[in-house]
Amino acid sequence: MAIEKNQIIDALRHVDDPDLRKDLVTLNMIENIIIDGEKVTFDVVLTTPACPLKNQIRQACVDAIHQYVAQGVDVEINMTSSVTTRRRETDAMLKEVKNIIAVGSGKGGVGKSTVAVNLAIALAKTGAKVGLIDADIYGPSIPMMFGMVNERPTGYDKDGKTYVYPFEKFGIKVLSIGFFVDQSKALIWRGPMASMALRQLFTDAEWGSLDYMVIDLPPGTGDIPLTLIQDFPLTGAIIVSTPQQVAIADVRKAADMFRNDKINIPILGLVENMSYFSPPESPEKKYYIFGQSGCGKFARELNIPLLGQIPIVSAISESGDAGIPMAVNDDSIAATAFKKLSENVAQQIAISNSVREIFGSAGRPDNVK
């Protein structure tokens, strides 16, 4: 029996994207169907290379063709990706950047920069094009975490204006205010001057085409994060906290800032840093030194996902101090946690982009998780 293309398409209408709750054909995720006798080859275009469900989707496609076409069909699937965006062609600022992610916190000392750096690297390791901006004007830490404390970016002049080239390291493009100032001295800038410097990291740099731009915000809800949130087209925000109630109380303020009616930035989820301790000799054991499920309870209260739980591992801070962040390596419990975090963040961005495209800025319906 000859296999026809419409049979394959009809079969794949029975396969839903688990996140977007629609079938792959309706979502235009099936491309390049080739039929050669009893062999069928096609592409599945995922919404991100970091999709955590790619193997599940692949198997569902194979099962659907065997069920609705013929059991003996040889199915070969190429899992590729095209990162989604809700940016419009008319957006003038950072028009080649598909998604801008702000990583913030209600207070300092919770590991926000560590999460931002390792998230960016983990996303890049999936094959995505990623940029990282250190927007913590008064406490830039990314130059140290990348082993580039004394580095200075190069640039060029065009139409009387100077543009800089971001550094490229660990598979991502990166810029920090720390590359332009003496980090051994206090940065004495008032709010407007700091905001102007921050804006230049975005507008006066050759970022090129990016799937994700991760922004390490300063802690709190002051001038700098407000300037960024109001002036740049953010896809969403990630909030970092530790499990203690005193930290979560400050996180509530950050959540209120993003959800303010005049700002209205989607919160992609919460990250619990320093979540638990696992002894090297017994990695399966978890000791919740600062309390268990503090961020989980708060995430449920806000009706947002808990994107990840990062363990207490001395190697995380040691690797950052040494200029080689933990996510660069693959063979540790912490690296695995950052990989899972990157998958969950990419997943939530794809969901948010899809929901806002369908329902507008009012947000996601209650049945979308």
Image: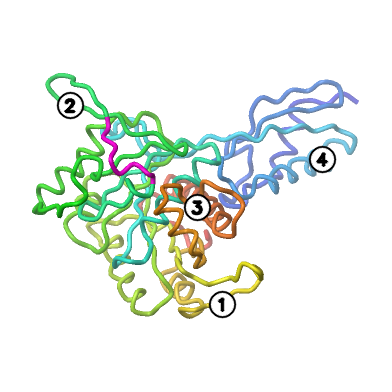
Residue 25 x, y percent position in the rendering: 63, 37
Q: Is residue 171 above or below residue 287?
A: above
Q: For the residue labelled by badge 3, is the local secondary structure a helix, a strand or a loop? A: helix
Say if the magenta span includes residue 149: yes
Q: Earlier in the sequence, mark 1 or mark 2?
A: 2
What is the crowding at mark 3: few (fewer than 14 residues within 10 Å), some, or many (at least 20)?
many
Q: CA distance from mark 2 to mark 4?
A: 60 Å
Q: Which mark, by number, is residue 162? A: 2
Residue lying at 80% horizontally and 33% vertically, measured from the top left: 75
Q: At numbered mark 2, what does the secondary structure look like: helix, strand or loop?
A: strand
Q: Residue at x 32, y 71 (%)?
A: 252
Left-right relation of 138 to 171 = left
Q: Which region is colored magenta?
A: 146-153
| Residue kind at label 3, given as amino acid type | Met
Q: Quadrant of residue 250?
A: bottom left
Give the residue type at disc 2.
Thr
Query: Which label is found at residue 326?
Result: 3
- Tell me if mark 4 has few (under 14), some (14-19) or many (20+) residues whose alpha carbon lies within 10 angstroms of its own: some
Q: CA distance from mark 1 to mark 3?
A: 21 Å
User: Which is more toward the observer, 91 or 147?
Assistant: 147
Q: Which mark is residue 213?
A: none
Residue under label 1: 287
Based on the picture, tell me whether residue 8 belongs to the magenta stretch.
no
Q: Which residue is mark 4?
A: 68
Q: Under tag 1, what secondary structure?
A: loop
